Amino acid sequence: MKKRSGSAVFFAVIIGSMVLCGSSCRTIDVFEKNSSIPAQEWDRAFQPVIVFNITDTAALYNIYVTLRHTHAYNYNNIWLSVNYQLPGDTVKQQRVDIPLADNSKGWLGTGMDDIYEVRRLITPQPYRFKNSGTCTFTLEQIMRENPLKHVMNAGIRVEKVER
């Protein structure tokens, strides 16, 4: 077996690092955080708070509510009150009706076994943040049933729009 020189080993380490970095150091311009609903029964008093930072105010973003539920969920939709505060702005509120099922198609979204995930865009068009800083979203279920059974997770997803 031939012994390698110090410079050959150094060169091999540099090349290897570049290959690894090129395949694994790519940034994904996406933020997503989901909160688990205790015992899969969403009580109105439990209001997940999602906090993230925005630094790029030149980009356009899509903002989604994400939900996971089981096949035992009793309704075709869910109503949420989404309270949000964007950097440099006051707290605002938006009521959102998220369809989860269709009578002819069944459950919407993606499913695996008895779990379904739905993402619902809550910005009518791509959104541009006016200021950089901290964004805070609070999710509250506002259905008549309380607690709302068979809801597993609720969260927020933010994606940069590709130009």
Image: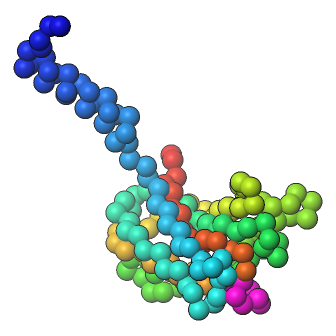
Q: Is residue 93 visible?
A: no
Residue at 92% across, 60% down: 104
Could you tell me residue 39's position as x and y percent? 63, 79
Identify whether 126 is placed above or below 142. Answer: above
> 131 or 12: nearer the eye?
12
Q: Is residue 48 visible?
A: yes
Residue at 61% across, 84% down: 140
Q: Is residue 143 magenta?
A: yes
Of all residues, the one furthest to the top in this rendering is: 2
Q: Main secondary structure of the magenta part?
A: loop
> 9 or 107: nearer the eye?
9
Q: Does residue 122 appear left or right of residue 32 in this picture?
A: right
Could you tell me residue 23's position as x and y percent? 38, 34
Identify whether 87 is placed above or below 110. Answer: below
User: In the rendered structure, which segment of residues is drawn in magenta?
Assistant: 141-148
Of all residues, the one furthest to the front in this rendering is: 1
Looking at the image, what colour scheme do you see? Answer: rainbow
Could you tell me residue 66's position as x and y percent? 61, 66
- Residue 65, quarter of the rendered image: bottom right
Q: Is residue 100 magenta?
A: no
Q: Does residue 126 appear left or right of residue 59 in this picture?
A: right
Residue at 74% across, 55% down: 113
Could you tell me residue 143's position as x and y percent? 74, 86
Of all residues, the one furthest to the left in this rendering is: 6
> 95 or 128: nearer the eye?
95
Q: Quadrant of the N terminus?
A: top left
User: How many badges with numbers are in the image?
Assistant: 0
- Residue 114, quarter of the rendered image: bottom right
